Amino acid sequence: MILDYLTSNGLNKYPFDDRATLQTNAGTALANNLFLDLLVASKSPTPVGAFLHKFSNNRDEFYYTLGFTLFDSAGITVHTFEFDIQYDNVIEKEFYGIANEFVAVKVVFGASFITLKDAIVDLTFLKQATTLAGSAFVPMVPRVTSLAFYNWNNGLDGPNPAPAAYFEGNEQSPLANLTLQEGTNTSFSQVIENQMIWDVIPGAGTGIYNDCDSNTGIKTINGLEPEVFNRNFVMAADECYLVYAGSVDGEILNPEPAMLSFINKCTPKCTSNDLKGFANYLNRIRDGTASVFAYASNTFDVIKQEIDLYRQTVDAEKIIPRYDVRWIKNQSITGKYYFSIAASFTNPTTDPQMLYLTIVTDGGIPRLKYKIGNTTTILEENTNMFDVEVPCQSTLYVDLVISTWVSIPFTLTGSFGSTAVNFSEQLI
C-alpha cells in the first residue's frame, strides 16, 4: 500500500479545517499525516459539520478506535458515535468505511496509522481542535416534501386560501411524480411552465370513468366545485413541478390530450462549502495527475532506452530470467525500525518460467503478497515459501514490510528458471 500526500495536502490541514488547532485535550499535537482523506456524510438534515473527538490505539486487542461528533448550526451536539478499525484492515486495505442510520464515514489511512500501532495512544479533542473541512463533511440535501393543490377563483378566498388537496412526504422518502389523467368531460391545456388549465367541458376528454350516458359534467373534485364563471378547474403547481399535458417516460414527454402529468424538476442546490470542496478535490486530482504523467513519461523514456540498448548489445540466446531486490529503512517515533523490501523477478524469455522462493528473517514473516500484471495474490499468514509460474515476458513483484527493534539478517533463496536466487543482507 502506497502512503503519500498529494501536493495540495502538504499546504493545509486537510481533512481538517485550516483553522483547526490539531491540539489534543492534553496539549499534544495530532500528526498531520494520520489521514490521507476523510469523508463524513450525514443522513439527517440537522447537522452542518463534524469533528474528531477521539483517537485511541488498543494494542492488546489490535484495533484503533475513532470517535466523531456531529453538530448543528448553533454548534450544539446532534449525534456522537465511535467505531473500531482492526489492524488487518489498516495493513491490507487503503481505506475503511462504516455506515449506520445517522451517518456514513470513509477513512483513507495515512502513514501514522501504521507507525502508531506500537505506541500507547488515547487522544481526545474539542470542536475547535479537529473540526472537519467543508469538503470532508457532506450535509443532507433538502428535498421537496409536500405538494398542495388550490382552487383558482381570482382571489375570492382571500390572500391565504386553504389547499384543496395536500400531499406530504419526508426527507427520507421524497414525493414521487404525480400524474393526473383525463376522464370524461375534462380537458387539459398548458398555460405556462408550471401551470395548467383543467377545463370541464361536456363531451371532452377520453370518455373513461363515465358511469352514466348523460351529458352531466364533473361537478366536484373531492367535494370542491369549479370556479363560478366558466365552471373550470385550474391546476397550479409551485416552482418545483412542471405541469405537462401528456405522459412522461423518463425524460421523454409524450403529448396526450387526455392526461395531465406533474413532474418534479427540482434538483439539490450546492452550498458554497460543496463548491469549495469540489474545487479542492479537482485541484488535488490535477496535482496527482500531473505527477503521474511526469513520472510515466520519464519511465517510458528510460524503458525505451533500455530496450533499445538491450536489443543492440545482448544476444538473444543469452536472455535468461533475472531478479532484483531493493529495500529502504524507516524509523517510527517509538524508535522501532520498519524495513520496506521489494523484489522483482523478470522473465524476458518466450516461455513461462517457474519461481521457487524461500524467505528467511529473524524478524518474522508478515503476510506475503505478490503481483503479476494487474493480479495480486495474498498468501496465508506465516507463509515464508511459495512457488508460482511467471508468464513469458512478464515480471512478478513481491513486497513486504518487516518491523524490528534491532538489526536482523534477511535472505531470499530458491530458483527462477535457470537462474539461482541467492540474496542475503543484514538489515540495519
Image (cartoon, rainbow, N blue to C red):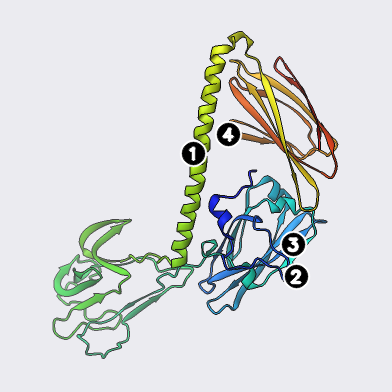
Mark 1–mark 3 Cα distance, whole angstroms, equals 38 Å
Residue 107 in the image: state x and y as whole percent.
62, 56
- Looking at the image, tell me whether mark 1 or mark 2 is earlier in sequence order: 2
Pick whichever, 352 or 146, lies toward us. 352
Residue 293: mark: 1
Q: Which residue is mark 2?
A: 26
Mark 1–mark 2 Cα distance, whole angstroms, equals 44 Å
Q: Name which residue lies at 68% across and 50% down.
A: 111
Instruction: Give the residue type that dot 4 points to.
Output: Asn
Q: Name which residue lies at 40% across and 69% down.
A: 175
Q: Name which residue lies at 30% across and 72% down.
A: 239
Residue 19: quadrant of the picture: bottom right
Instruction: Give the residue type that dot 1 points to.
Output: Phe
Please name which of the two marks, 4 or 3, marks the residue nearer to the observer. Answer: 3
- Looking at the image, tell me whether mark 4 or mark 1 is earlier in sequence order: 1
Tag 4 near tag 3, CB within 8 Å: no
Q: Which residue is mark 4?
A: 374
Pick whichever, 176 or 43, lies toward us. 43
- Above or below, comparing residue 252 to residue 146 in the picture: above
- Looking at the image, tell me whether mark 2 or mark 3 is earlier in sequence order: 2
* Residue 112 as seen in the image, left or right of residue 428: left
Tag 1 near tag 2, CB within 8 Å: no
Q: Name which residue lies at 22% across and 77% down.
A: 234
- Looking at the image, tell me whether mark 4 or mark 3 is earlier in sequence order: 3
Residue 126 in the image: state x and y as whole percent.
66, 72
Please name which of the two marks, 2 or 3, marks the residue nearer to the observer. Answer: 2
Mark 4–mark 1 Cα distance, whole angstroms, equals 19 Å
- Above or below, comparing residue 75 to residue 286 in the picture: below
Residue 56: mark: 3
- Looking at the image, tell me whether mark 1 or mark 3 is earlier in sequence order: 3
Mark 4–mark 2 Cα distance, whole angstroms, equals 46 Å
